[in-house]
Image (cartoon, grey):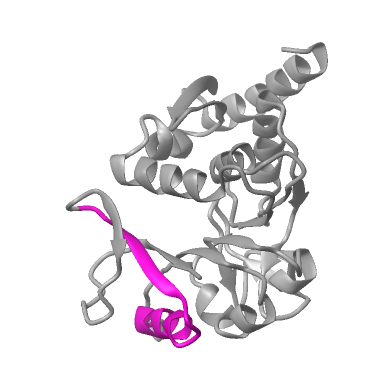
Amino acid sequence: MTTFLRKKVEKIRAQFSDQFLEFKPYIGNIVMDGHSLRFFYGTPQAVDWYDPLQRHTRIEFEWMARRLQGTTQKIIDAGAYHGLYTLVLAASAEPGSEVVAVDPIRSNCALIEVNLLLNGLKARIEPCAVSRRKSMVRLSSGSCGHIVNQGGIECPALPLTDILPDATVAKVDIEGEEFEIFPEQIDAMSGVHTWNVEIHPGTGRHPQKILEAFASRGFQLLWVNRDSCEVEPYPLAQPWTTRTSIIAIR
């Protein structure tokens, strides 16, 4: 580890150790499908989510890694959190690929930067939310904030077309805002051949709307079946019973 990286890691570690008192951030290794990634576990939530990786998460990561392997891509990771998906995508695509990690939370962006440095990977970090148009929005507190009508903190928001208009791969996990940007952004981002969208059902937010938007535009829909632990075609007629990600490919 270089002196620069060591100092940066120690600064981030001290910041999050103070914030969470008993919790002590640490660096671990995540091995999957031929890739060994170093990951800075900066918060208890990150540990809960990623150490160890749940089986369905690993299967999804490995499927995406194989999809990108040996190809040059332009990749958006919208809702990047601490950058683990960013690392998987950046490590899997060929050198020369362009990767953009998008997250509105400044502390998340700092952790993304550290994780990229730990692995010698490059990505542009966009500290903003994702919305239908360029604007200023209010964001709820917390490391997975969502857009709210009042309260919270103000932050910039951009449509995907303003971030990487010629993207070929887009992973989108934006806490319900997917219902606002789709299907408009599917049409505007016509070069995307692989979408990975985490769908967040709620009042007035019906998953079928997202599924039908992709299916009607000729995308094949896949999902990680948590019972079989396989990536399988998503049965459109099946009622939506769980929060999960849809992979839309063409």
| Residue lying at 75% horizontally and 23% vertically, measured from the top left | 8
Q: Is residue 34 visible?
A: yes
Which percent across, then down, holds residue 203?
Answer: 37, 82
| Residue lying at 53% horizontally and 20% vertically, measured from the top left | 26
**Residue 223 is one of the magenta-drawn residues:** yes
In the rendered structure, the answer to whether residue 93 lies left or right of residue 233 reads right
Q: Is residue 141 above or below residue 183?
A: above
**Residue 209 is one of the magenta-drawn residues:** yes
Which percent across, then down, holds residue 221?
Answer: 38, 71
Q: Is residue 137 above or below residue 198?
A: below
**Picture mark count:** 0
In the rendered structure, the answer to whether residue 62 lies left or right of residue 16 reads left
User: For the magenta stretch, what is the residue range?
Assistant: 206-226
Q: Residue lying farthest right?
A: 4
Place residue 91 in its image quadrant. top right
In the rendered structure, the answer to whether residue 48 lies left or right of residue 249 reads left
Which percent across, then down, holds residue 117?
Answer: 72, 28
Location of the N terminus by quadrant is: top right
Place residue 70 in its image quadrant. top right
Q: Is residue 23 visible?
A: no
Relative to the observer, which residue lies in front, 122 or 2? 122
Place residue 88 in its image quadrant. top right
Relative to the observer, which residue lies in front, 228 or 219? 219
Q: Is residue 53 above or below residue 75?
A: above
| Residue lying at 67% horizontally and 80% vertically, measured from the top left | 132
